[in-house]
Amino acid sequence: MENFWTYFEVLVPSVGVGLVFWFAMRAIFRADRNERAAEAQVREDASQRAERSSHEATDGSANSAPSPR
C-alpha cells in the first residue's frame, strides 16, 4: 500500500496540470467557435440589410411619381 501512495503523490501533479491544460484549451476552442458563429451571423445580417437596401433603391428609382402622403 505504501507504493500506491508514492506513485499517487508522483502522478497527481502531472494529472492536475494536464486537466488544467485541457480545461484551458477547451475554453479557448469554445470561445473561438462562438466568436466565429457570431461573426457569421453579423455578416449574414449585413448582407441581408445590403440586399434589402439595394432592392429599396431600385424600387424607389423605378417609380418616378412621388408617393402621396
Image (cartoon, grey):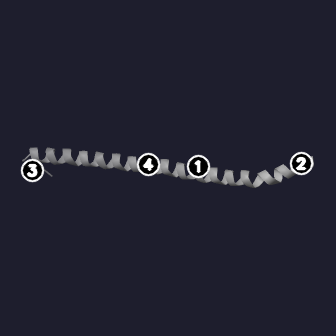
Q: Earlier in the sequence, mark 4 or mark 1?
A: 1
- Foreground pick, 61 / 15: 15
Q: Which residue is mark 2?
A: 3
Q: Which tag is nearer the camera, tag 2 or tag 3?
A: 2
Mark 4 Cα shell of 10 Å, populated few (<14), some (14-19), many (≥20): few
Q: How many marks?
A: 4
- x%, y% of residue 55? 19, 44
- Foreground pick, 19 / 13: 13
Q: Is residue 15 left or right of residue 8?
A: left
Q: Earlier in the sequence, mark 1 or mark 3?
A: 1
Specify the amino acid type for callout 4: Arg
Q: Is residue 14 left or right of residue 5?
A: left
**Residue beneath the point at 9% across and 50% down:** 66
The Cα–Cα distance between marks 4 and 1, rounded to whole angstroms, is 15 Å
* Numbered circle sitting on residue 66: 3
Q: Which residue is mark 1?
A: 26
Mark 2 Cα shell of 10 Å, populated few (<14), some (14-19), many (≥20): few
* Numbered circle sitting on residue 36: 4
Specify the amino acid type for callout 3: Pro
Residues at marks 2 and 3 touching, judged by CB atoms closer than 8 Å: no
Task: Identify the secondary structure beneath mark 1.
Answer: helix
- x%, y% of residue 34? 48, 49
* Numbered circle sitting on residue 41: none
**Residue beneath the point at 34% across and 45% down:** 44
Specify the amino acid type for callout 1: Arg
Q: Is residue 46 left or right of residue 20?
A: left
Task: Identify the secondary structure beneath mark 4.
Answer: helix
Task: Identify the secondary structure beneath mark 2.
Answer: helix
